[in-house]
């Protein structure tokens, strides 16, 4: 059974750092592209922030380039998101997702999500609150 379990969210001051973790089980992590996406407060749409392809190529949304780093440890079956220089607008629920193999243009997900399903699974999320 596929499971994705996020952790590491917290309340942090602007300019601070957090490291999120996503523990994956039930599948071979190395075979899939993985991402972190955020849902902001209220009814904000999902935003894919960072993608790690199965060849470990990475892609980032413009809003987090230079501040966030996605990485993976296939041996530990874990995906990470290192977040630095956090801003109040980074506040939200952060989710780890396994990207569907039907998606070939991974970078495009950081700009706009397609209307169809682009993921296979995602976890329950972890909350990040950036505030003074």
Image: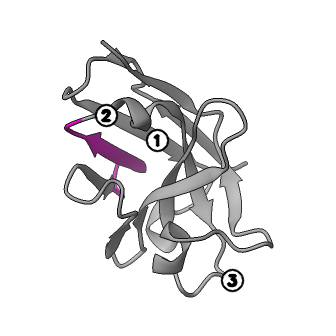
Label 3 crowd (10 A; few <14 / some 14-19 / many >=20): few
At which x and y percent is residue 48? 52, 58
Q: Residue at x 52, y 79 (%)?
A: 108
Label 1 crowd (10 A; few <14 / some 14-19 / many >=20): many
Q: Is residue 82 magenta?
A: yes
Report the residue marked by disc 3: 102
Q: Is residue 114 left or right of residue 130?
A: right
| Residues drawn in magenta | 73-85
Report the residue marked by disc 1: 22
The mark lying in front, picked from 1 and 2, is 2
Numbered tag placed on residue 87 in the rendering: 2
Q: Residue at x 52, y 47 (%)?
A: 24
Q: Is residue 23 left or right of residue 131?
A: right
At which x and y percent is residue 80? 34, 46
Mark nearer the N terminus (1 vs 2) = 1
Q: Quadrant of the C terminus?
A: top left
At which x and y percent is residue 62? 35, 64
Looking at the rendered structure, the secondary structure element under dot 2 is loop
Looking at the rendered structure, the secondary structure element under dot 1 is strand
Looking at the rendered structure, the secondary structure element under dot 3 is loop
């Amino acid at each position: 059974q596929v499971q994705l379990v996020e952790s590491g969210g917290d309340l942090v001051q602007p300019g601070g750092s957090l490291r999120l973790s996503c523990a994956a089980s039930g599948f071979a992590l190395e075979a899939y592209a993985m991402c972190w996406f955020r849902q902001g407060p209220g009814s904000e749409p999902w935003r894919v922030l960072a993608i790690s392809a199965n060849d470990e190529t990475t892609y980032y949304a413009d809003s987090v380039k230079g501040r966030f780093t996605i990485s993976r440890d296939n041996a530990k079956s874990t995906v990470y998101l290192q977040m630095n220089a956090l801003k109040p607008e980074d506040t939200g629920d952060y989710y780890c997702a396994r990207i569907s193999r039907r998606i070939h243009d991974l970078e495009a997900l950081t700009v706009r999500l397609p209307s169809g399903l682009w993921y296979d699974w995602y976890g329950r999320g972890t909350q990040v609150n950036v505030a003074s």
